[in-house]
Image: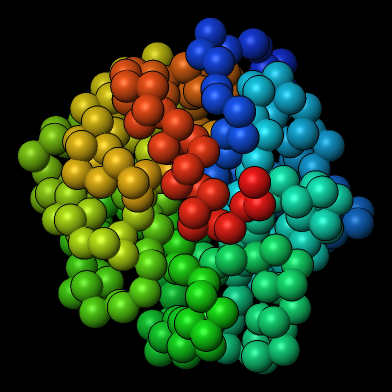
């Protein structure tokens, strides 16, 4: 039973035209359930169809992706067990980004670290409940700093504008999901994109050039290309890429993940930069063992 309607992913992943280099990493994907083993949070806005670790592995095998960063999504709330289970069965190929709150102890964070977690995520987007309590968020960030973790923020364009001063004061590595979800319909000179570009001038800011299907007007999502290219030009050594499988809360145009991977050489035609984005940058941020 789904709490709110949530489209299933396209599990008929085709073979991409682009061949990813060895040790490429999908730096933004999710594990959902199975809900009979890992129940969804009662307070979650949406309950998606199951998309477990086996489904994710099949997608990655077709895409030629060897590594992944599993990002805790709001449907599981702060219960990170499904994420930890998938990491533990990956033989070192997965890392994780958890969700947490003020109830988490130092021991909780140490256990998460031992389980392969390297960051914490906070959602600001309205359809997922809006911004977190900022006092609580700051308390969590203080607890994770000794572990060397980073902060992942899931924001809409409006959040980049509204919370720019708050984000500017944070002194730790910050990773922005999905190019800040800036709508391509608003143009490349829109305020939110300019704020994101300014943040990316700073050495502790990173961004995922994922979510083309979320910011573009329609398939084949080519209107997202200049946005990704602009971010890459500013900081190629702090760019990550991900599928966002299984694409929660897509309202239309459910993508095939091969189409998203085939955007990568359009975002970054230079093979050396492709390797930076897919291999070197995630290995450095998440500590993959070579």
Left or right placement of residue 100 versus residue 57 in this view: left
Q: Given the current orientation, which residue lies at the most extreme front position? A: 290
Name the spot of residue 136 as percent of width and height, x first: 47, 87
Name the spot of residue 104 as percent of width and height, x first: 65, 86
Left or right placement of residue 53 versus residue 225 in this view: right
Residue at point 66%, 52% (across, down): 289
Residue 90 vertical position relative to residue 256 in the rendered view, above or below = below
Residue 40 vertical position relative to residue 90 in the rendered view, above or below = below
Residue at point 76%, 40% (across, down): 51
Name the spot of residue 68 as percent of width and height, x first: 64, 44
Q: Given the current orientation, which residue lies at the most extreme right position? A: 36
Left or right placement of residue 177 versus residue 225 in this view: right
Residue at point 35%, 54% (across, down): 206
Residue 10 vertical position relative to residue 242 in the rendered view, above or below = above
Task: Report the front residue among 255 and 28.
Answer: 28
Q: Is residue 214 visible?
A: no
Image quadrant assignment for residue 225: top left
Task: Report the front residue among 42 and 70.
Answer: 70
Task: Report the front residue among 250 and 137.
Answer: 137
Residue at point 14%, 33% (across, down): 187
């Amino acid at each position: 039973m789904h709490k709110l309607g949530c489209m299933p992913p396209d599990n008929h992943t085709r073979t991409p035209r682009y061949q990813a280099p060895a040790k490429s990493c999908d730096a933004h994907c999710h594990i959902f359930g199975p809900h009979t083993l890992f129940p969804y949070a009662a307070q979650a806005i949406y309950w998606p169809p199951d998309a477990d670790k086996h489904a994710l592995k099949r997608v990655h095998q077709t895409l030629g992706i060897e590594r992944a960063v599993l990002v805790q999504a709001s449907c599981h709330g702060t219960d990170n067990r499904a994420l930890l289970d998938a990491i533990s069965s990956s033989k070192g190929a997965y890392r994780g980004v958890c969700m947490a709150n003020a109830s988490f102890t130092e021991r909780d964070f140490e256990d998460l670290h031992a389980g392969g977690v390297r960051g914490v995520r906070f959602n600001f987007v309205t359809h997922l409940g809006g911004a977190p309590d900022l006092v609580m968020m700051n308390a969590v960030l203080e607890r994770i700093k000794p572990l060397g973790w980073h902060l992942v923020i899931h924001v809409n364009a409006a959040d980049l504008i509204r919370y720019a001063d708050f984000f500017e004061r944070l002194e730790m590595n910050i990773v922005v999901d999905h190019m800040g979800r800036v709508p391509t319909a608003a143009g490349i000179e829109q305020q939110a994109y300019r704020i994101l570009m300014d943040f990316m001038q700073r050495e502790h800011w990173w961004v995922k050039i994922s979510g083309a299907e979320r910011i573009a007007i329609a398939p084949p999502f080519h209107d997202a290309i200049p946005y990704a290219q602009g971010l890459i030009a500013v900081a190629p050594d702090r760019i990550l890429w991900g599928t966002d499988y299984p694409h929660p809360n897509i309202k239309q145009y459910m993508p095939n993940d091969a189409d998203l991977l085939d955007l990568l050489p359009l975002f970054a035609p230079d093979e050396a930069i492709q390797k930076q984005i897919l291999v070197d940058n995630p290995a450095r941020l998440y500590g993959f063992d070579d």
